[in-house]
Amino acid sequence: MSDVNAILLLSCADSKGIVAKISDFIFRRNGNIVHADQYTSKTDKLFFMRIEWELNGFALGRDEISAAFAPLAKQFKMKWDLHFTDYMPRMAIFVSKHLHCLHDLILRRHMGELASDVEAVISNHTDARDLVEQFGLKFFHFPITDKNKKQQEAKELKLLREMNIDLVVLARYMQVLSGNFLKYYPDKIINIHHSFLPAFAGGNPYQQAYNRGVKIIGATGHYVTAQLDEGPIIAQDVIKISHRDAVDAIQRKSKDLERIVLARALHLHLENRILVYGSKTIVFE
């Protein structure tokens, strides 16, 4: 418990005294605040906050904090979540034939850089099996066609429930998940899209970028919603290209970027630094 911190993520209508009340709640129980960040949307008059404090010496046990904080949350009509830094979410990675992001995530996990347990890798192809099993991870193959997609998604969901999966990462999974699938993991499915959204949404953004002669390409890590490639954006980055870059060169440069952006988006989620706000995110980096 000595190294464990509590993290409170919250949003509510903006008003005077919110920060003071929350800080006082922690102070009066002998808590030591180690990180605090806030944002106010002037347009919508909404307040957002991430605050983290040490549990060592805190007067409340971790199971008592929610009940103690609830009256204050009710007073300001807050939407809030409480997290603890020692919790390791159980993650499943979905992938198709493009394995560069999967390689990167597996290596980061192997080096202890991911605050998550990779419980399964799920694919509609078998290309990733050897890589996954080489690192002692579980691989599951669910081939998908237009005729069997609904049945295969049902099997995937059953597997995720049996494995108590908290988070799904689409590491270049070239399938569109159904609305029925998405409803089980709201704001818990992260996708990497190989363009700087909203530009070049949908398929084959490399060719689209080449055809338009753009000078910058990007990658986008975002939460998945029913609207294709329109979910709340978590992280983005760009790299320069020129008229000399053919489609394969654009693809090679983009792959490097996709690895970095997906890892960044995943770290922000795992560190509980994101509040979803309509079609956008508030990211406390």
Image (spheres, grey):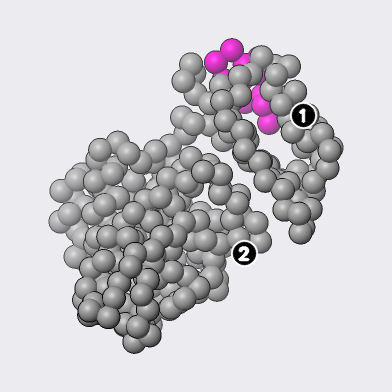
Residue 151 in percent (x, y) is at: 41, 72
Query: Outermost residue, bottom direction?
Result: 211
Residue 165 seen anywhere in this rendered image of the structure: no
Give residue 147's mark. Answer: none
Element at label 2? loop
The quadrant where residue 171 appears: bottom left
Q: Is residue 64 above or below residue 148?
A: above
Q: From the viewer's side, name the closer residue of 247 and 99.
A: 247
Sequence order check, earlier mark of 2 and 1:
1
The quadrant where residue 72 appears: top right
Residue 52 in percent (x, y) is at: 58, 30
Q: From the viewer's side, name the closer residue of 83 and 182.
A: 83
Residue 57 among those drawn in magenta: yes
Q: Which residue is mark 1?
A: 20
Q: Is residue 19 above or below residue 143?
A: above
Q: Residues within 10 Å of mark 2 (few under 14, many from 20)?
A: few
Q: Amino acid at mark 1?
A: Ala
At x 54%, y 66%, the residue is 231
The quadrant where residue 169 appears: bottom left
At x 61%, y 33%, the residue is 36
Element at label 1? helix
Residue 100 in percent (x, y) is at: 24, 60
Q: Amino acid at mark 2?
A: Ser
Residue 10 seen anywhere in this rendered image of the structure: yes
Q: Which residue is mark 2?
A: 279
The residue range painted magenta reads 55-66
At x 46%, y 56%, the residue is 235
Q: CA distance from mark 2 to mark 1?
A: 29 Å
Magenta-colored segment: predominant secondary structure: loop
At x 69%, y 23%, the residue is 26
Q: Which of label 2 and label 1 is nearer to you? A: 1
Q: Is residue 179 above or below residue 117?
A: below
